[in-house]
Image (spheres, helix red, strand yellow):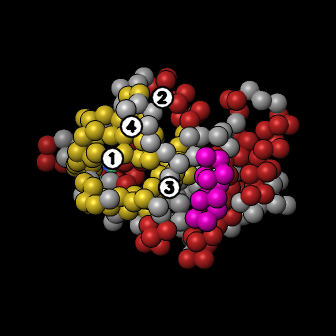
Amino acid sequence: MDDAAILRTEGLTKTYGKGSGKTVALDNVNLKITRGKLLAVYGPSGSGKTTLLFLLGGLDKPTSGRIYFEGVEVSNMSERRLSKLRRNSFGFVFQNYNLVDELTVLENVMLTMIFEGKPDAERKDRAKELLRRVGITGKERRRPSQLSAGEQQRVAVARSVANRPELVFMDEPTGNLDQENSQQLMRMVADMVQGEGATCVVATHNLEVVNEAPSKVFLKSGRIVSS
Ligand SMILES: Nc1ncnc2c1ncn2[C@@H]1O[C@H](COP(=O)(O)OP(=O)(O)O)[C@@H](O)[C@H]1O
Ligand SMILES: [Mg+2]
């Protein structure tokens, strides 16, 4: 086993639909993700980035091929074990934030720690500290919709690492942000992920994000064309 690889795929393939309506979203992808590094997955719209993240994050199943997380095959895991793995070991940031507007900003960050069984005060302290680190102070009691797009995405980043995940998946996290906010967000992502000792996989079509990333793969029509 390769100790440096936290996640590894073998012949990962995903097709949608059947017959003439069949789409090959991922075509025989072999990938190794190095522990502790930020990996950017770059490709045009429709190249399979979201599909890849969903499969790696255990949110969907491959049509064929395998995924190993720390040497253990996860592509054949039961939904029950997978949901436990997602809860304990993975964090997610999506393009449209997925923050819960019925909760305050602080409660949104506390939410992913709910399964840790820690006292409320401890979860609250950690959530406040994470929000401070992404530059959200004094706005903890607001609803997400009362923040700017950039601020909401920073809350989503804080939330994604709250449960101390080993892997954080981000799908076009700068998709709705202008250049300045994109740069600021990616700097915070890098700091957070490094500070938490997590490995981060970022799907993006933002060339600046790709250029800054220590490792990268390029997807085209569901295939890795270079890395
Ligand atoms: N649920 C789905 N049903 C059918 N086709 C899909 C579905 N999700 C994605 N696709 C197709 O799979 C391909 C890859 O999509 P996606 O992974 O979303 O790419 P990206 O995130 O790079 O834009 C596209 O051709 C897309 O139309
Ligand atoms: Mg996508």
Q: Earlier in the sequence, mark 3 or mark 4?
A: 4
Q: Earlier in the sequence, mark 3 or mark 1?
A: 1
Circle 4 SS class: loop
Mark pair 3, 4: CA separation: 18 Å
Q: Which residue is mark 4?
A: 2
Amino acid marked by disc 3: Leu
Q: Which residue is mark 3?
A: 38
Q: Which residue is mark 2?
A: 82
User: Magenta segment, which residues?
Assistant: 186-197
Q: Are marks 4 and 2 in contact (CB under 8 Å)?
A: no
Query: Percent x, y for residue 97?
Result: 59, 55
Q: Is residue 167 visible?
A: yes
Q: Earlier in the sequence, mark 2 or mark 3?
A: 3
Mark pair 1, 4: CA separation: 12 Å
Q: Earlier in the sequence, mark 2 or mark 1?
A: 1
Q: Is residue 1 above or below residue 94?
A: above
Circle 2 SS class: helix
Of badges 2 and 1, nearer the viewer stands 1
Mark 1 crowdedness (10 Å alpha carbons): few <14, some 14-19, many ≥20: some
